[in-house]
Each structure stands twice: as C-alpha cells, then as structure tokens.
Amino acid sequence: MKILAIESSCDETAAAVVEDGRSVLSSVVASQVEEHRLYGGVVPEIASRRHAEAIVPVVSQALSDAGLTLEGVDAVAVTHAPGLIGALLVGVNFAKGLSLASGLPLIPTHHLRSHIASNYISNKELKPSFLCLVVSGGHSHIVMVEDYTRMKIIGRTRDDAAGEAFDKAARTMGMPYPGGIALDKVAEEGDPRAFTFPRPVVRDAPYDFSFSGLKTAVINLIHNSAQKGIELSKPDVCASFRLAVVNCLVSNFLRAADDLGVRRLVIAGGVSANSLLRKMLAEEAEKRGCEFFMPEKSLCGDNAAMVGSQAYYEYLSGNIAGADLNAYATMSIE
Ligand code: KG4
Ligand code: ZN
C-alpha cells in the first residue's frame, strides 16, 4: 500500500510516499528555518504563509521523485495534530482537497505518533511493544507503545520541553535558532563537569520531567557572568548544560523501563538527534542487556516519511477521516 503523506505542523513543509509503512519511495522537506531565524523562533503567521506557498511544489516533487502520479497512490495521510493551528490547517485542507478530488481515503495522523514511527523506517525489525522517550521542541514524554496505535503516557514534562530548554539556553548564548543542534555541536568541545546544574525531579511523579528551573539556572549563570564582566567558556557551559538535561531524560526513562519491566527501548523526536543522549542510552541499554533503537539522524526532525509510516498502521486500525476532518493545536498521543 502506497501512502502520500503530508506534514505542516511547524516550520517544515514536507511530503513523502511510503510503502507498507516501512519503505520510503520519496521524501521532500522544505524548511523555513532561515526565515524564522531572523526572529529567534517560529513566527506562526509566517509559517502558515510559507506552507501555503510550498505545499503544491513539495507534494508534486514527492510524487515525481517516487515516479508516481496520484493514480498510483492508495491513500493520502496528513498531520492533523498537535502543532501550530494555522500551519496544520494548510496541510489538512490540502490533503482534504486531494482526497475529495481523487476519492482516495484520508488518514489523519498524530505528529508525535509519527515521530515514534520514524523508528519503523530506520529499524525494519522493530515492532511494538516498547517504551519510547519522545523528545521534541514542544513535548517530552515517556510513552508505552503497546501497539502501533495503542499508547499510554507514563511520564511527561510539567513545564518546558527538553528541546525548548536547549533552544532557550542556546539563544541566551547567541546561537542561531533552533539552538539545540548548535549547542550539541559546541558541547563536544567542552568539559561537562565545569559547571554544576540542578537535576530537577518532580515530587511523587518519578517519570515526569521539569526543565524550566534548569533553563533559568543556565540563563542566570550567563547573565550574572556578563554583568560581572566574567567571560565564560561557551563549550563548557554547553557541555555542562547538555549533560544535566540528558541525565534527567535518561534517569527517568530508565527508571520507568525498570519499574515496568520493559526491555525494548526507543527514542524519537528532534532531540533524539542529540549525540550525548544517543550515546548514553546506547551504553546504558547494552549494560542492562536491553534492546535499543533510534531513528537515523535525518529522520529525527520533522519530515513526512514518518507520517507515511504511522499512517499505514492508522489505516490498518481503521482510522480514516471524512471531509469534516479538522486540525487541533493540542491532542493527546493516547
Ligand atoms: O521534533 P522537532 O523537529 O519539532 C517539533 O516537533 O517540535 O524538534 C525540534 C527540536 C528543537 O528544539 C531542536 O533544537 C531540537 O529538536 N534538536 C536538538 C538537536 N537537534 C534538534 N536538541 C538537542 N540536540 C540536537 N542535536
Ligand atoms: Zn516534530
């Protein structure tokens, strides 16, 4: 079954053709990041306008890269939640139009479920059940993936997402948006023991995260030093901060895995590209004799291939939308 998938939840307009949930026939991503960089973050109104401009060429390119026309496709899938509402609506309405004009079934797909599905493309042998750490710019969840479309949230952030904390820390150090990627690179040159940052825990909720205090701690360190005229080593700050965030993620995730007795561990979302997180979890999993899976780096960020993968399983479970499909800024992964 060949699915044409469309993604427009944030600042990437993407389309892909994916066969049977696992094999990517084409994947096109048009990023707006350069434009949003001018403002230090995503400007929702600009995002919607750029999606409206990009959607036709991006979808056409995905079809032609796969050597197909709409006649060769079996269904249209689209991210309908969660995300920036104006941005989501561009993809949803375009997919609705395609489905109405062609008679193809329309499959609504949850953005975070799609991030998890990027692993089905990178790891062909991976099947549920497993425990997944889903870490993106807007979410930090520990999710029990019982089946392809049956999930349970085990832990979640109480305030900022891990990606948000990375981006804010990086921005305070003058790095361009989205700073998480740059911070990860600079951290490689630094000493992670140079500064001590807190490892916040949430009382009575051992699997939940809290990153806002950690974010404030790094911002205060940078501002206080600047006021006193003290020059900080950027690589040392980045390395110490990255270690603190990754320690929080890894320790709650492993604790949940131990308590639930799960031995198959998976990571997903933009922050799953983080080199320290990948390395630390790979090592910990090996020590414990657990299986560990991660998406290839090119599939960690937003793309439509992951949407086409998840949509296949949504279709098999009967999740098909009508012409009244709407977009939602928030929606639980469950
Ligand atoms: O999943 P994603 O592409 O978009 C959302 O759905 O939010 O995640 C974007 C987030 C940004 O905060 C970005 O800074 C972060 O992922 N990110 C990273 C790395 N690469 C991307 N954070 C830390 N280390 C990285 N290597
Ligand atoms: Zn995303």
Image (cartoon, rainbow, N blue to C red):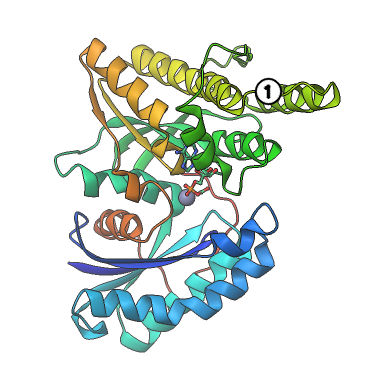
- Residue 258, quarter of picture: top left
Quadrant, the N terminus: bottom left
Badge 1 amino acid = Leu
Residue 69 visible: yes
Q: Callout 1 environment at 10 Å: few (<14), some (14 to 19), or many (20+)?
A: few
Q: In this view, does 177 lie to the left or right of 325?
A: right
**Residue depicted at 26% across the width and 58% down the height:** 312
Q: Position of residue 320 (x, y in %)?
A: 35, 65
- Is residue 6 visible to us here? no
In this rendering, the answer to whether 198 lies above or below 15 is above
In this view, which residue lies farthest toward the right? 227
Closer to us: 78 or 105: 78
> Which of the 4 quarters of the picture holds residue 315?
bottom left
The foreground one among 241 and 288 is 241
In the rendered image, the vertical position of residue 269 relative to residue 218, given as above or below = below
Residue 207 placement, left or right of 42: left
- Using residue 292 as the reference point, say whether residue 213 is left or right of it: right
Image x and y of residue 209, in percent: 57, 24
**Residue 106 in which image quadrant:** bottom left
Dot 1 beta carbon under 8 Å from ligand 1: no
Q: How many labels does the image show?
A: 1
Residue pointed to by mark 1: 232
Image point (61%, 23%), residue name: 237
Q: Quadrant of the C terminus?
A: top left
User: Outermost residue toward the bottom?
Assistant: 101
Identify which residue is drawn at 73% across, 26% down.
222
Q: Is residue 97 above or below residue 182?
A: below
What percent of the width, then of the height, locates residue 135?
A: 47, 37
Out of 155 and 196, give the one closest to the viewer: 196
> Which percent across, then down, holds residue 234?
61, 28
Q: Is mark 1 on a helix, strand or loop?
A: loop
